[in-house]
Amino acid sequence: MKRMLSGIKPTGQLHLGNYIGALKHFVEYQDEYEMLAFIANLHCITMPQDPSELQKNLTDCVALYLACGLDPNKATIFLQTDVKSHAQLGYIMCCHTYLGELNRMTQFKDKMAKNETNLTGGLYTYPSLMAADILIYDADYVPVGEDQKQHVELTRDLAERFNHKYGDLFKVPEPLVSKVGARIMSLSDPSKKMSKSDDSDKGCIYLLDDLKVARKKVMSAVTDSLANVKYDVVNQPGISNLMQIYSSLSNDLPFEEIEKEFAGKGYGEFKKAVADKVCETLEIIQNRYKEIIDSNIIETTLQQGAKKASEIADKKLDDVQKALGMEII
Ligand code: ATP
Ligand code: LTN
């Protein structure tokens, strides 16, 4: 069985972009692949976090993994910090990543361009740790949204570099970026990615948003004056974004079908249909979330996950250290 791995940072509440771009695929793939899904709680501290908020977000994030349909009997679900070898291999990766490579990473460059102050070494070397997360499990595939593709490509380069220098150590992983929904845009500004760190809440639908609030966000989504439901990212980015959401939540209904369904109908009617789909999805997730959050399933899931993941990761770290001559044997 091929192995798949991915993670999400528990920075703030998970949103519809995380669900459509990543989480939904983890669930779809768990039957076909050996799925490892973790919470990237090392990556999340690359930006300042409030400790009590972070702690709540961690629990919510695991609960949402489960509420979205990840099954702990099929997938290995764990916290990054529960598998200590991630950080250690991360350091080894860091020592093999060139400054030029880190300088080219758009996520870091974007933050630099915004003149954000107090950016840290952790943020800069984030991609090296991400490479370790992936390579330590010999993952075949990494399902991610568009914004993470570049990091997986760097991971491939690092795997090849190690294999070339130290012998066949790592599997070279492939990013899996879905055709539809890999970059859901903000509802209030369709030129920006829907993001947890969005300045305004209006553009981002959180998975735990009150259904009325979520509906309102869809109904107030920025569109255009062309009055035509058509997939045209350049001229109709807002409508195209809503079409992506509608398609992803309707078993990847093709855009042509959506265009036909809403031909001659107003944006109000289309937005209502999108809002219905979003609320339907959120309601199922939220009902499951309520059952999970008060049970002990989170604790048992994480214990079981950490044990299984550590067995694979610790062995790999040992192999790597031996290959690099770092151990006395
Ligand atoms: P932040 O705002 O802190 O950067 P984020 O909302 O981008 O966070 P991440 O934890 O960085 O969330 O991403 C988790 C997964 O969700 C990644 O695979 C990422 O590519 C995907 N993802 C994030 N935002 C979107 C989006 N708007 N559309 C599609 N996929 C997304
Ligand atoms: N950088 C990713 C989170 C992440 C990840 C990973 C994703 C950390 N390590 C390994 C896939 C594989 C993000 O979503 N921002």
Image (spheres, helix red, strand yellow):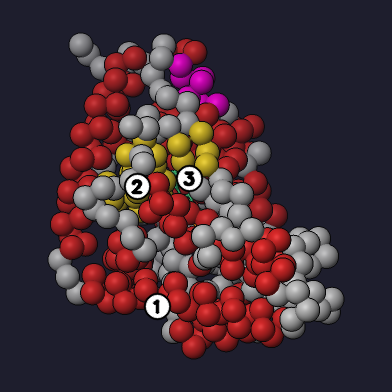
- The residue carrying mark 1 is 283
Compare residues 172 and 255 and report the one nearer the observer.
255
Q: Residues within 10 Å of mark 3 (few under 14, many from 20)?
A: many
Lateral position of residue 304 relative to residue 260, left or right: left
Q: Which residues are magenta?
A: 157-163
- On the image, the x and y values in percent for residue 8 come to 42, 54
Residue at the image point whose x is 70% and y is 55% from the top: 113
CA separation in Å, label 1 and label 3? 25 Å
Q: Amino acid at mark 2?
A: Gln
Picture quadrant where residue 288 is located = bottom left
Secondary structure, magenta segment, majority class: helix
Report whether residue 2 is seen: yes
- On the image, the x and y values in percent for residue 204 come to 56, 73
Q: Of circles 1 and 3, which is in front?
A: 1
- The residue carrying mark 3 is 143
Which quarter of the image is occupied by the N terminus?
A: top left
71 relative to 322, above or below:
below
- The residue carrying mark 2 is 30
